[in-house]
Image (cartoon, helix red, strand yellow):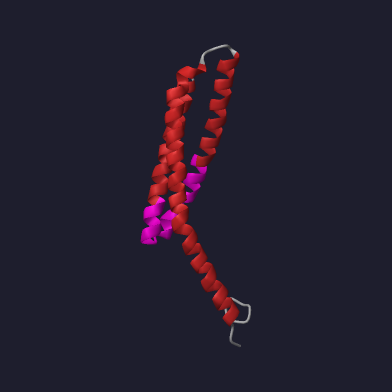
Amino acid sequence: MIDITVLELQSVTNALKESILMDIEDVRKANHESLVTRNAEKLTFMDSLSELKQKLNNELSDEYQKGNDISVYKTSIDELEIKLRELYDLNGQLASIVLPVKEMYKEIIDEITEQNGGSLVEVMA
């Protein structure tokens, strides 16, 4: 059971990693529609990661309580941890691209709002 859960976690991690790589490419190409479309999919992946992580913790705890040696899973869990760290780093790369763009848009909106007397859109009557 534990091996299957680890494989499921690795699969979801790989899928999320591919999704983030596509996000990075779409940000560079300013392909916003694909980014928005993929967000729901990424949320599903993240929910799955969370559920599978809890499932793995429960399975390991059960095996330990039964007196079984859980160190036999160390290698596969270490490999999973490496994949999760790679995912974390990749997500940081995406954030380092997206956050400056977000800040630039905020500054533009703030400037326009200030020039229009506190309103984003100036209405002429």
Which residues are drawn in magenta? 23-45
Return the x and y of residue 109 as percentages of the image width and height: 54, 72
Residue 76 position in % (x across, y down): 43, 25
Does residue 97 appear anywhere in the picture? yes
Quarter of the image for the C terminus: give it.
bottom right
In the picture as drawn, the residue positioned furthest to the right comes out as 118
Q: Identify the residue at horizontal 44%, vertical 31% (top origin).
A: 80
Q: Is residue 87 above or below residue 72?
A: below
Residue 25 belongs to magenta span: yes
Q: Is residue 55 left or right of residue 27?
A: right
Q: Position of residue 110 (x, y in %)?
A: 57, 73
Q: Is residue 93 above or below residue 8?
A: below
Say which of 81 and 112 sits in front.
81
One can see residue 38 in this view: no
Asked if residue 70 lies left or right of residue 10, the reply is: right
* Whole-percent x, y for residue 54 in the image: 57, 30
Q: Residue at x 58, y 18 (%)?
A: 62
Tell me the chief SS of the magenta region. Answer: helix
Question: Quick check: is 9 in the magenta stretch?
Answer: no
Residue at figure coordinates x 61%, y 77% from the top left: 119
Which residue sits furthest bottom? 125
Q: Is residue 58 above or below residue 44?
A: above
Give the residue at x 55% y 22%. Answer: 59
